[in-house]
Image (cartoon, rainbow, N blue to C red):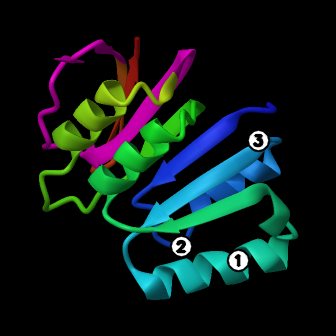
């Protein structure tokens, strides 16, 4: 795979760690909760992937701005915000505004199947959706 992966609202880090296990070159984990970051750090140590990870504690919108100012680019950006909050649209707008996605990269949004997401956000265009039980995965690209 060899890609750069951004895991937003990382929780336990399971998605980013799965990306590493499948060959991602590196993962940036973004999580606001300090306890969750501790869990991610432990999981990375147990799996042997700590050297391929960067952990950032902070609100996603602020971290997106920071990553943009550092000119970071990602092949895959995954976001799984809390289902009862309205973070998806603002997060997608921040990804587009700060140009964090490689030209051929994709953004994957995990949300409730009942959540209506916009087809377009700035230059990002939804090109696919998949339902799995109560979960909806929406895929965006430039």
Q: Residue at the spot x=44%, y=37% of the render?
A: 68
**Quadrant placement of the N terminus:** top right
* Other residues around mark 2 within 10 Å, as few (<14) / some (14–19) / many (≥20): some
Q: Height in image: 62 above or below 32?
A: above
- Specify the farthest residue to the right: 48
Q: Which residues are magenta?
A: 102-127
Which callout, 3 or 1, points at the residue further toward the start of the chain? 3
Q: Is residue 42 above or below residue 3?
A: below
Horizontal placement of 26 versus 37: left or right?
right
Residue 121 occupies which quadrant of the picture? top left
Instruction: Report which residue position mark 2 lands on.
Output: 12
Residue beneath disc 1: 43
- Please tell me which of labels 2 and 3 falls first in the chain: 2
Instruction: Establish if 2 lies above or below 82.
Output: above
| Residue 79 point in image, percent of width and height | 40, 47
User: What residue sits right under mark 3 in the picture?
Assistant: 24
């Amino acid at each position: 795979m060899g890609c750069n992966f951004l895991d937003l609202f990382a929780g336990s880090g399971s998605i980013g760690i799965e990306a590493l296990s499948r060959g991602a070159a590196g993962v940036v984990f973004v999580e606001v909760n300090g306890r969750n970051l501790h869990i991610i750090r432990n999981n990375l140590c147990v799996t042997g992937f700590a050297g391929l990870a960067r952990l950032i504690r902070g609100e996603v919108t602020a971290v997106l701005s920071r990553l943009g100012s550092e000119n970071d680019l990602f092949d895959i950006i995954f976001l799984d915000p809390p289902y009862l909050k309205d973070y998806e649209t603002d997060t997608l707008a921040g990804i587009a505004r700060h140009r964090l996605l490689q030209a051929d990269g994709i953004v994957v949004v995990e949300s409730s199947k009942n959540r209506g997401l916009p087809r377009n956000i700035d230059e990002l265009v939804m090109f696919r959706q998949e339902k799995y039980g109560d979960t909806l995965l929406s895929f965006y690209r430039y």
